[in-house]
Amino acid sequence: MPERIVIYGLHAVSAALTHGREKPIELWLDAARHDARMQQLAQAARAAGVAIRTVEQAELDKAASGARHQGVLAFCRSQPVYSEDDLPFLLEKLTEPALLLVLDGVQDPHNLGACLRSADAAGVHAVIVPRDRAAGLTPVARKVASGAAETVPFIQVTNLARTLRGLKDAGLWLIGADGAAAASLYDADLRIPLALILGAEGKGMRRLTREHCDTLVRIPMHGTVQSLNVSVAAAVCLFEAARQRG
């Protein structure tokens, strides 16, 4: 019997129904809600052949472990996460310069979800994270991602340094974000095939990851704040890349 995962939240469940690699097995809807958004979700589920149950809020609360589910929850078969072995195929099929986001040890699923959401909006081709000591695609990350977890390839790698060397061999330029860097993000050429690398909350990139970067850049800061949340920094970097790419 395949393992089941739980997805909750309006955007995440809607994306699973319309863009997911595997459709949900079953959809739970709050019996007390009859608004248009719920009707649309139910209609999409019926069109996809997904079973629907109306349940009390207490059942939803329990299944979502008390998280804010917005009255909707879906059970899905666990989807295989991409690994480093999938990277060459992903890069080969691109018809434009690669834009990858590498997160070196981001552990907060809220931050991961926010990074995925920005990655989707900026046109990122894949998000790469280490398998150990980093957040994975938990229900919280999926909800915060608002559907981006279903559209952006998420690649967990066992050896990040080896993966970075592989990206270099494939012709990608590795640009790391570091608050102490001399060069400004806005002076970097982000139109070339590249991977943008950001480090963990509070710690930044690990030494070995930093050593693999071809260039380090900083986001210019004009106020008294010394640093940005990793998800905010990722959004700034990614949208500068999107701006340069037109």
Image (spheres, rainbow, N blue to C red):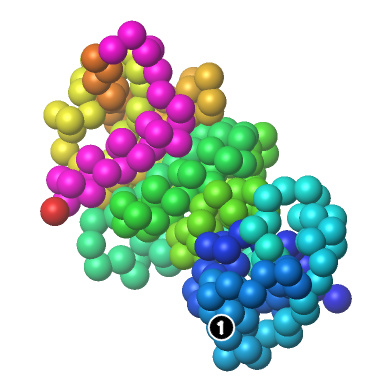
Q: Give the residue drawn at x 54%, y 43%.
A: 112
Percent x, y of residue 125? 37, 58
Location of residue 3 by image quarter: bottom right
Secondary structure, magenta segment, majority class: helix
Picture quarter with the N terminus: bottom right
**How many numbered marks are there?**
1
Residue 161 seen anywhere in this rendered image of the structure = no
Residue 184 seen anywhere in this rendered image of the structure = yes
- Is 132 or 108 nearer to us in this picture? 108
Location of residue 228 by image quarter: top left
Q: In this view, does 93 lie above or below 186?
A: below
Percent x, y of residue 54? 77, 76
Q: Residue 243 lies in magenta, yes or no?
A: yes
Stretch of the chain drawn in magenta: 223-245
Percent x, y of residue 6? 73, 62
Percent x, y of residue 155? 53, 54
Q: In this view, does 138 lie to the left or right of 218?
A: right
Q: Give the residue drawn at x 73%, y 82%.
A: 52
Residue ID for mark 1 = 44
Q: Is residue 134 left or right of residue 167?
A: right
- What is the crowding at mark 1: few (fewer than 14 residues within 10 Å), some, or many (at least 20)? some
- Is 73 or 106 nearer to us in this picture? 73
- Toward the top, the furthest residue is 224
Q: Give the residue drawn at x 82%, y 66%.
A: 56
Q: In this view, does 181 lie above or below 150?
A: above
- Is 104 or 219 nearer to us in this picture? 219
Q: Give the residue drawn at x 73%, y 85%.
A: 51
- Is 39 or 207 nearer to us in this picture? 39
Q: Is residue 103 left or right of residue 46?
A: left
Give the amino acid at mark 1: Ala
Q: Residue 131 lies in magenta, yes or no?
A: no
